[in-house]
Image (cartoon, grey):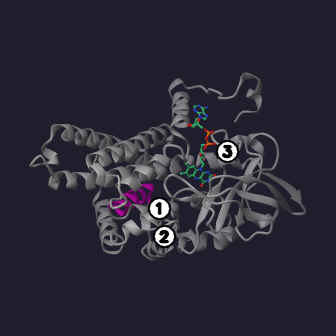
Amino acid sequence: MDFNLTDDQRQFCDMVATFARKELAEGATARAHAPTFPHDVAKRMAQIGLLGITLPEADGGTGGTLMDAVLAIEQVARFCPRSADAIAEGNFGAIRVLAHFGNEDQKRRFLAPLLKGEEVIVVAMTEPDAGSAVTDLKTAATPDGKGFRVNGSKVFPNPFADQYLVYVRYGPGVDGIGSVMMRRDAKGFSIGKPSKFMSGANWAPIFFDNVYVPPEDVLLPAGGFKKQIAGFNAERIGNATRSLAYGQYCYDVAREYAKTRKQFGRPLCEFQGLQWKFADMQVKLEAARLLLYRAATNADRGLPAADETTVAKLMCNQAGFEVANEAMQAMGGLGYTEESLVEYCVRRSRGWMIAGGSIEMMKNRLAEIIFERRFSQRPPRAEKRDS
Ligand SMILES: Cc1cc2nc3c(=O)[nH]c(=O)nc-3n(C[C@H](O)[C@H](O)[C@H](O)COP(=O)(O)OP(=O)(O)OC[C@H]3O[C@@H](n4cnc5c(N)ncnc54)[C@H](O)[C@@H]3O)c2cc1C
């Protein structure tokens, strides 16, 4: 057991930190408050190999590890929290599903522009009546010639993405679920009234009115849901990393502030009430980081890691938000203003306790691992159709 990064990992961190300090630190505040995705940043990251870190070189990736992608998010977030989104979306989530299950033609048409930072993909999974109970989704794909007609709606995705990885139902039950690729300009695809999350990010309902999906745009046919879910352990690592990285950003800013800001003629760091806050924050961050690194490192070795990724997501989501929130308190009024990115990180990190599998759903999953049995969340009568 070795708790230290390797020389290669340290060098990689230095390289990413140097890039982020030089090219991303300036403009970090404006980027955080901009309503749209930082496309320019994604393009620049593509040039230096920070998108598709975990994907094979044959697919246009850089053949690195999950741990590399984790380190990259952490290093970028130190200087520009918002830019860490470009790394996260270029390495985790829908892009990995596409890279893993897409055929050569799909990789050429959909994956290639993502890896160049030219396009953005999001997953369209959640529906008005299917959130945590995602297997209740109703968006239907019915056969039409060789392809399918898709009808239904989704909530919460970014309405400005270029590509949507849409979860659809080809037939009844969990085995009836799979996914298709869709572009925003598809006939019958429309976007409803845009709204905002607490983070400031946009979301909107999207509607599918008889959208034709040709056979070559089917990503996973019926039976695909379980395959996609199997990949979720890796995705949880991406979500967890941003939480941790945002908490760390706030901690670093607040620590510097506490060293210089004086009240009652003394720097804040001399007040024990604040010293203990920082001690608690430090413990939370270190514990979360160890759990995250364990999950990422073991996932890279191909070990089954559902328990480790679940624990890591839970801990990082909670620690990230709690530390960001406490750092804001330690900075007083300034921490609550838009002059500091701490308030932004508080708002963003709160969302990750809900997205990507809520804290409660993680605990449900953990209970199943602990007791080595399945606990259906459905009323007894409906258990048969449960996932
Ligand atoms: C910032 C953000 C970004 C998102 N981005 C996307 C996106 O890009 N694409 C997409 O498809 N979706 C996206 N979502 C939606 C997200 O996946 C859902 O919000 C999430 O799955 C929870 O579903 P819900 O909101 O319907 O809450 P519900 O499922 O209605 O849950 C409400 C509350 O009840 C709890 N709960 C539900 N069931 C149980 C249970 N069995 N046991 C204990 N507690 C339970 C939940 O944890 C939650 O606290 C995003 C959400 C957020 C906040």
In this figure, which residue is indicated by the disc labeled 1? 85
Report whether residue 222 is seen: yes
Circle 1 SS class: helix
Instruction: Write down the quadrant of residue 65 in the picture.
Output: bottom left
Left or right side of 378 for 15: left
CA distance separating discs 3 and 1: 27 Å
Give the quarter the ligand 1 occupies: top right
Q: What residue is drawn where x is 35% and y is 48%?
A: 324
Instruction: Write down the quadrant of residue 147 in the picture.
Output: bottom right
* Location of residue 69 in the rendering, given as x and y in whole percent from the top left corner: 43, 59
Q: Mark 1 and 2 residues: CB-CB less than 8 Å, in contact?
A: yes
Circle 2 SS class: loop
- Does ligand 1 reach within 8 Å of label 2's beta carbon? no
Hey, what amino acid is under mark 2? Pro
356 part of magenta stretch: no
Hey, what amino acid is under mark 1? Asp
In this figure, which residue is indicated by the disc labeled 2? 38
Hey, what amino acid is under mark 3? Lys
In this figure, which residue is indicated by the disc labeled 3? 226
Question: Crowdedness of circle 2 by 10 Å Cα count: few (<14), some, many (20+)?
Answer: some
Circle 3 SS class: helix
Question: Crowdedness of circle 3 by 10 Å Cα count: few (<14), some, many (20+)?
Answer: some
Which region of the structure is painted magenta?
65-78
* Mark nearer the N terminus (3 vs 2): 2
Q: Is residue 343 above or below residue 58?
A: above
* Mark nearer the N terminus (3 vs 1): 1
Q: Nearer the viewer, residue 149 or 64?
A: 149
70 part of magenta stretch: yes
Q: Is residue 236 above or below residue 190?
A: above
